[in-house]
Every structure is written in C-alpha cells, then in structure tokens.
C-alpha cells in the first residue's frame, strides 16, 4: 500500500471530525473557516499528520485547491491557491482570504476514507437529522453490512442505477437532490457545473473527448 502523505492524512482527519462532530457537512457545503475549526493545526500535529505549521498550511492549501478531488470549491478560490503553490515563494497563508468561501466534501472519497476508520467513539446525538445520520453511517459501515433498504442510495453508488425510483440522481459533487421539472446545468446547493468533467487527481476541468488531464497527465475517467 502506498504511504499516505500529509494531504491524505489531513483529509482522513477531516472526514473523521465531520463524521463525529458535524455529520451534516457530509451532505452540504460549509465554510473554509469551519473546515479549519474541525482540523486545527494543534490536533493535526498531535496525531502526527504534520510536523510544523508550514507543513499544515501547505497540506491545507493543497486540500483547498481540490487536489486529488477530495473537496470541491469555487473555481476562483482553487485557481488562486493553485497559482500560489506553483509560485517560487508561495504565501501559505493565502487561504485566509477565503475563510468565508464554501467547500464541499467529495462523498465518494469520504466513503473510501471511512472504510479504514474505527467506529465513532460517541453515538450521534438524537437530534441529528436523519439524512445526516445515514450519510455518517455510509462512510463507516462496510457495504456488506448495510441494510439494503434502510439508507438511501447515493447517486455515485452503482446500485443506485438499478433502484426502482425513477427520480433524477442527486448532484455528483454534494449528493443533494436536483430539480426534476427543468434542465439543470448547475447544482442549486453547491453551485458546481454538472456538465463539466473534472480530473479525479487534480480536479482540473476536462474537455469532452480528452483521455488524459492536460494539467497532471492523469487518465480521464467518465
């Protein structure tokens, strides 16, 4: 197995913190400031994910750029931070200009990260919305153990394609329901362009017909 780098470790800790403290963030956008509150430098360093504040800021900036498709955010935010990281002397505090911008966790990557996590130490509060609870369960319960009808199928789950419901699949970025009475180009919940293809490695937009990403060389997926 390939060794995890600070970006992987930071995302894993983010998913765990969201699962344990703010499960509703698995289903809706939230602010960059709230992301930082969930995985502050002190706690990330204490767990050995990073050694210095610069290491933390660098990993956080990479996460916010959408590297490896872990999160989705405004194109302006991500383009600005990518340009900053590629500069000879990057400002690792540049992300602070976007503390009120919204990001969305990739539910596909959250499920993958959740498969290797131990169960939550404290059960979810009774007042947690049912949708949030089921999403929290989706990233911590092995697929083989999940009841077939108890939890709603995620639109990225292959099983959703054979579900008896004929309703339109949810947003592939945030999982929220989409209007069924009109043509939808952008998600009304997270604002992502639903017609655009994005690289799974660096989240750069891909033109139709491209087999490889021009930004990082990754094989394009459908």
Image: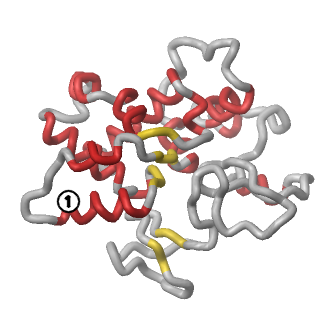
Which residue is drawn at the image coordinates 55% and 87% (left, top)?
209
Q: Secondary structure at mark 1?
A: helix
Q: Does 44 sit above or below residue 189?
A: above
Q: Quadrant of residue 52?
A: top left
Which residue is drawn at the image coordinates 16% and 41% (left, top)?
55
Horizontal side, residue 218 vs residue 136: left or right:
left
Horizontal side, residue 81 vs residue 143: left or right:
left
Q: Does 218 sit above or below residue 142?
A: below
Tell me if residue 172 can be seen.
yes
| Residue 28, x across and y down, in percent | 59, 41
Q: Does 38 sit above or below residue 211?
A: above
Is residue 73 or residue 130 the one in the foreground? 73
Which residue matches tag 1?
85
Is residue 110 or residue 207 the one in the foreground? 207
Which residue is drawn at the image coordinates 67% and 39% (left, top)?
143
| Residue 13, x across and y down, in percent | 38, 32
Horizontal side, residue 141 vs residue 85: left or right:
right
Tell me if residue 201 can be seen.
no
Q: For the C terminus, which image quadrant?
A: bottom right
Which residue is drawn at the image coordinates 58% and 36% (left, top)?
139
Give the class, few, some or many, for how many residues have Cα within 10 Å of label 1's Cα (few <14, many ≥20).
some
| Residue 84, x across and y down, in percent | 20, 60
């Amino acid at each position: 197995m390939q060794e995890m780098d600070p970006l992987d470790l930071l995302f894993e800790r983010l998913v765990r913190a969201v699962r344990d403290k703010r499960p509703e963030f698995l289903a809706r956008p939230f602010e960059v400031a709230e992301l930082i509150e969930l995985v502050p430098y002190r706690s990330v360093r204490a767990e050995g994910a990073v050694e210095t504040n610069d290491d933390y800021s660098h990993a956080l900036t990479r996460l916010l750029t959408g590297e490896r498709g872990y999160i989705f955010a405004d194109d302006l935010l991500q383009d600005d931070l990518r340009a900053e990281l590629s500069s000879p002397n990057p400002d690792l505090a540049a992300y602070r200009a976007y503390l009120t911008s919204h990001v969305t966790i990739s539910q596909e990557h959250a499920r993958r990260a959740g498969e290797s996590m131990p169960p939550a130490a404290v059960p979810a509060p009774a007042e947690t919305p049912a949708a949030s609870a089921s999403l929290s369960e989706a990233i911590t319960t092995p697929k083989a153990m999940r009841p077939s009808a108890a939890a709603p199928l995620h639109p990225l789950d292959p099983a959703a394609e054979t579900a008896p419901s004929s309703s339109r699949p949810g947003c592939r970025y945030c999982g929220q329901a989409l209007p069924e009475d009109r043509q939808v180009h952008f998600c009304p919940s997270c604002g992502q362009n639903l017609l655009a293809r994005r690289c799974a490695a660096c989240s750069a937009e891909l033109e139709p017909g491209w087999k490889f990403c021009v930004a990082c060389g990754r094989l394009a997926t459908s």
